[in-house]
Amino acid sequence: MIETRFSIPTPSHFSLWRTVYSHGWCALLPFHVDKEAQELVRIIELSDGTLASSSLSNGATGIAVRVRSQVKLSTDQKSEISGLLAMSLRVEEELSGFYAEARRHKQYRWIPETGSGRLLRAPTVFEDVVKMICTTNCSWALTTVMIENLTKHLGRRFADGAYSFPTPEALAGTTEHFLRKNIRAGYRSPYLIELADGVVSGRIDLESWRTSPLTTVELFEKVKSIKGVGDYAAGNLLKLLGRYDYLGLDSWVRSRYYDLHTRGRKVSDRTIERRYESYGTWRGLFFWLEMTKHWFDHKFPF
């Protein structure tokens, strides 16, 4: 095994672990947190098919990256790995406006002070969409089972026994019966196959969403055009695209909101939305960080 090391520069107000633990993606394969080594680990499949294991930790000049591969990596391959990891950690996302707004509100000043605000995402939009579909109408435990099954059944095995996330081609080559039986994807099975088929055929261009010129409302509707993606999933996928106009409400965040603001009393979604309207295009990010602040004050739940 050949080991390559490099670093990824980070902006001010960046926290690796606030980003890693920003939501549950770090607990879904092929992401893995090695708590003993204090590393975020994942298998990456490069555009030429090469597999590499990447381990990320805090470094003196940014993010320290350790890559293991079975062949010596070319300059282009190292650059691709660096770019994919930087994209996942959102190091190039401009958040100065968000931090300026946070400083205006006493209850949110902890955000820039702790380097919070960047939400971990997958190297590809395809992976983010598949995972988000697998969070709908089910427990987190079932989500982890589905993603583990997808990765181990349809991903490629690295030398250390870990797996890459399946490609659209791998998922498109399955059947609804296989996904129901082996992945436990249930009603999502035909949606996942249709999504993968659309990506493979070129009919659906998911990766363009990260740089889409569409307005946020237009992009929201485009994301919702994917079968299996409703308001909750679309709102949260937009956050992973750098658009924070939607709250992405589900049963967990509603319950958390009730505990924080209404002493457990249920209120309408519109009431929740009105509370955050004044934060404009950042409202979804303020909402999520407020709902999950206790993870960092106490213990990350995943």
Image (spheres, rainbow, N blue to C red):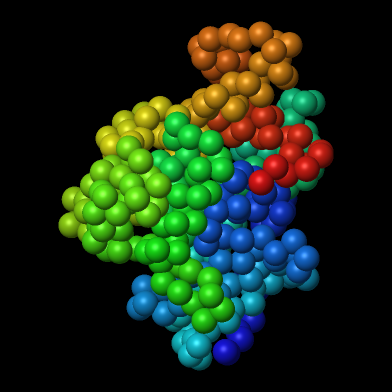
From this view, report whether residue 222 is shown above or below residue 258. below
The reply to whether residue 112 is visible in this rendering is no
From this view, report whether residue 292 is shown above or below residue 250. below
- Closest to the observer, 275 or 187: 187
From this view, report whether residue 30 is shown above or below residue 179. below
Instruction: Residue 98 in the image: state x and y as whole percent.
Output: 63, 37
Q: Splitting the image into 4 quarters, where does residue 201 fall?
A: bottom left
The reply to whether residue 109 is visible in this rendering is yes
Please name the residue shown 59% across and 27% down the image.
252
Please name the residue shown 37% across and 54% down the image.
182
- Closest to the observer, 82 or 172: 172
Please name the residue shown 60% across and 26% down the image.
253
Left or right of residue 290, residue 253 in this image: left
Q: Splitting the image into 4 quarters, where does residue 37 fall?
A: bottom right
The N terminus lies in quadrant: bottom right
Instruction: Residue 95 in the image: state x and y as whole percent.
Output: 61, 44
Instruction: Residue 152 in the image: state x and y as whole percent.
Output: 45, 64
Give the total number of marks visible in the rendering.
0
- Closest to the observer, 172 or 46: 172
Seen as rendered, the residue at the extreme front is: 181
Instruction: Residue 48 in the image: state x and y as whole percent.
Output: 35, 78
From this view, report whether residue 261 is shown above or below residue 27. above
Left or right of residue 104, residue 186 in this image: left
Left or right of residue 32, residue 112 in this image: right
Please name the residue shown 45% across and 50% down the image.
146
